[in-house]
């Protein structure tokens, strides 16, 4: 299966995400491709129901439950389904876990493939030419731009998403969270930490 970037209308739309959504919506409605009510329902789903809190729930479960973590790394979609998470643009998710010597970072060099059911709507920077071209070439510099400095000697593996495979980074569980339950743990999981351009919050951070 080819990468599906040819049908991404990014270049025809304004760069502001809200404007892009509106422009796309108008276009689809004008062409009679969608019913306005159906479109509204889809937008509402992604604005209110689907978002990084779902990915955070998965990561928190992986932190709290080693057996779930194993299942997640072996078959992410099956593990997500245990939590009732599935959906379009998330059919083939692969979870990659950070470790003390290894950091993982996700990009889509061709367009903007992204695990929507876990993380919601991708941030604008994820789709930017700068991120897409630099993530592979100079991941350490990109991380520095995001304010992330990894310990000396930590390797960085960059995963290039496609229409077929979307990646979810499982960051390391922060120290000082012993005994925390999943709900509390999930509050430490940021969207960027699941893309690999960030780290989880520290338990004592404001
Ligand atoms: Fe893509």
Image: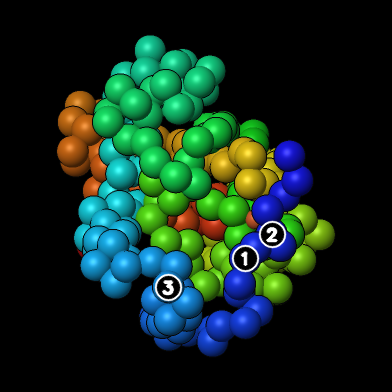
| Ligand 1 located in image quadrant | bottom right
Name the residue rendered at 50%, 36% in the picture: 91
Dot 3 or dot 1, earlier in sequence: 1
- Residue at point 75% right, 65% down? 134
Is the residue 152 above or below the residue 206 in the image?
Answer: above
Which numbered tag is attached to residue 5? 2
Q: In terms of secondary structure, where does tag 3 sit? A: loop
Q: Secondary structure at mark 1?
A: loop
Q: Circle 1 is placed at which residue position?
A: 8
Q: Evaluate if marks 2 and 1 touch, with contact meaning CB atoms under 8 Å apart.
A: yes
Question: How far apart are labels 2 and 3 at the CA level?
Answer: 23 Å
Task: Quadrant for residue 11, please give it.
Answer: bottom right
**For this rendering, which residue is in front, 191 or 79?**
79
- Relative to residue 49, is residue 91 depicted above or below? above
Residue of label 3: 32
One can see residue 23 in this view = yes
Crowding around mark 2 (Cα neighbors within 10 Å: few <14, some 14 to 19, many 20+) is some
The reply to whether residue 63 is visible in this rendering is: no
Foreground residue among 173 and 166: 166
- At numbered mark 2, what does the secondary structure look like: helix, strand or loop? helix
Position of residue 193 measured from the top left corner of the image (x, y, whole percent)? 46, 50
Q: Is mark 2 within 8 Å of ligand 1?
A: yes
Task: Point out residue 138 in the picture as x, y percentages from the top left corner.
Answer: 77, 61
User: Which mark's residue is nearer the viewer, 3 or 1?
Assistant: 3
In the rendered structure, the answer to whether residue 71 lies left or right of residue 166 reads: left
Where does the image place residue 177, in percent across and percent down from the top left? 27, 35
Q: Are marks 2 and 3 in contact (CB under 8 Å)?
A: no
């Amino acid at each position: 299966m080819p990468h599906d970037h040819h049908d991404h209308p990014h270049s025809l739309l304004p760069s502001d995400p809200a404007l892009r959504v509106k422009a796309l919506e108008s276009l689809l409605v004008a062409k009679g491709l969608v019913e306005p009510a159906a479109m509204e329902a889809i937008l509402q789903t992604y604005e209110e129901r689907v978002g990084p809190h779902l990915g955070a729930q998965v990561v928190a479960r992986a932190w709290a439950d080693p057996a779930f973590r194993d299942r997640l790394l072996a078959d992410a979609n099956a593990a997500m389904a245990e939590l009732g998470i599935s959906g379009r643009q998330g059919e083939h998710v692969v979870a990659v876990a950070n470790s003390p010597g290894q950091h993982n970072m996700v990009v889509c060099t061709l367009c903007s493939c992204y695990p929507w059911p876990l993380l919601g709507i991708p941030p604008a920077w994820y789709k930017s030419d700068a991120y897409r071209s630099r993530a592979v070439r100079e991941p350490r510099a990109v991380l520095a731009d995001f304010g992330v400095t990894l310990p000396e000697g930590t390797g960085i593996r960059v995963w290039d998403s496609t229409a077929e495979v979307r990646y979810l980074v499982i960051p390391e569980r922060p120290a000082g969270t012993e005994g925390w339950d999943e709900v509390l743990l999930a509050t430490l999981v940021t969207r960027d930490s699941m893309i690999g351009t960030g780290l989880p919050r520290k338990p004592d951070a404001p």
